[in-house]
Image (tube, grey):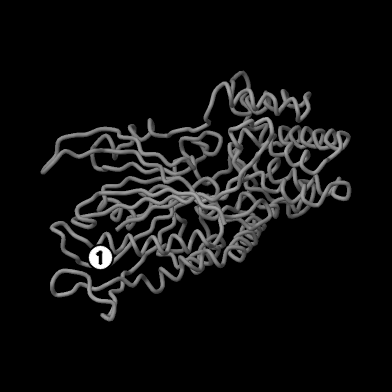
Amino acid sequence: MLIIISDIHLGDGTCGKSISASAFRLFSDRLRELAISASWRSGGTYQPITEIDILMLGDILDPLHSTLWLEKNSDESGYVRPWTDYQAPEYAAKLQEITRAILKNNAGSTGFLKNLARKGLKISPRARNGQPGLKFCTPKMVKVRLHYMIGNHDWYYHLPGPAFDSIRQEIIDAFGLDNSSNPFPHEQSESGKLQMLLYQYQVYAQHGDIYDPFNFDKVKGRNAATLGDAFAIEIINRFPIEMERRFGKELPPETSKNLSELVNIRPALATSLWISSQLRQNNVSQAMQLKLKNLWDEISEEFLALPFVRAADRKFKLDLVDGLKVIIKITDSISFKTLDDIVVWIRKRFGSEDITLSHHAMKEEAFLDHKAQFIVYGHTHHHEIVPLDSFQSVPRPTNQMYINSGTWHPYYDLAVHKPEEQKFIPYQVLTYLAFFKDDERGGRHFETWSGAFSD
């Protein structure tokens, strides 16, 4: 049995909360149920499966959303950002510091996965009559292997070199991974072991960030930072810090705490509504709101002035930098309240922000040559199943499908009733995909599960 999960975004706690450890406990329970279900074979007999492979399809750890990147300014010695020279010793040192903070902050969560990898799962053995053995029978142990592929938030673990090998080994030890300390793969073709595993289940899998120009540079490849990295660090991560530093004594305590959750706001377009809601709920004065709006404008302008951002701005060609300039310039001259009204109007006029990468799936070689029945991406956080094609094969037609692995994430989601009232509802989302081979699960090929819960 093969399980695929992605976009867990475990952070160090400086930029919002990670999903709670209870999600991993829930997953462990569901995994045991799935293992038992997969042990029922075609014909109605019970034969315990012997192994489970869990593929973590990118954005598992999230070093990007950490305020530790912001400890030094560009004019100070030891300044490092994702887009500075990764061969400089301070780069790996900073990544190691952030990685260790993430692992420490999520030790309870990773512990569930490590326990699975070390001890496996216990399920009922097969009795002589082809049925599950009774409770007093010695349980059957199912081996569990964990595999880590990277996405756009954890691409640093794809960087080559001994210093990064050492960091990867710490991750391997924390999760109990089946990976080596070599660069974690971004494409399945980078790992022969992974390629063979996915081939058994007729699955082609990648994170999906290569189709997002804001978070992947086609020219520089995956070992390079993007505008998305710069925007996240210099605006989303930085705003709450600067707010606290400049106005902390003047703001209600809850305001600073809640604004650190900017990374967990959905939809992303509602970020300004979240800021306004916190200011309103905490009775922040109009004078202070103006100061905060000026701060937002200031750090946005400084972001556009970064040499890394300016270098991405191509003359005489509309590009992502131009788009960011337009957004920032539009918001530069209006209040949060006016911006809120614009956001509400856009959401009412154009509806959902859901996106799909399914059209890219139909261009994959594995789809075109019929080697894969399932094309699996993550990245969008939007779990979906899209039928792509059906072709004749023996002994029956094969259906090709695109499946997105969704996310494991805490959200503050904007209520659709009277969004102008800025009501956000917290909950956590958990999605996982299961694939079966041979006659596992009675011959079923796949199933997916996506749910939400609130602690």
Q: Is 85 or 171 nearer to us in this picture? A: 171
Query: Looking at the picture, how far across and down is residue 231, in whole percent?
Result: 65, 39
Q: Residue at x 62, y 25 (%)?
A: 323
Asked if 224 appears above or below 346 in the picture, the reply is below
Quadrant where the C terminus sits is bottom right
The crowd level at tag 1 (other Cα within 10 Å; few <14, some 14-19, many 20+) is many
Left or right, 281 with respect to 5, comes to right
Query: Looking at the picture, how far across and down is residue 372, in whole percent?
Result: 27, 43
To which quarter of the image does residue 184 belong? bottom left
Query: Looking at the picture, how far across and down is residue 202, in whole percent?
Result: 26, 47
Please name the amino acid that badge 1 sits on.
Answer: Ile
How many numbered dots are placed on residues in this image? 1
Asked if 344 appears above or below 184 in the picture, the reply is above
Q: Is 251 or 363 nearer to us in this picture? A: 251
Which residue lies most toward the top here? 316
Left or right, 238 with respect to 31, comes to right
Quadrant where the N terminus sits is bottom left
To which quarter of the image does residue 145 belong? bottom left
Left or right, 40 with respect to 23, comes to left
Query: Looking at the picture, how far across and down is residue 337, in whole percent?
Result: 76, 28
Q: Residue at x 29, y 40 (%)?
A: 366
SS at mark 1 in the image: loop
Q: Which residue is mark 1?
A: 49
Which residue lies most toward the front here? 417
Left or right, 171 with respect to 299, comes to left
Q: Is 338 or 224 nearer to us in this picture? A: 338
Asked if 451 appears above or below 25 in the picture, the reply is above
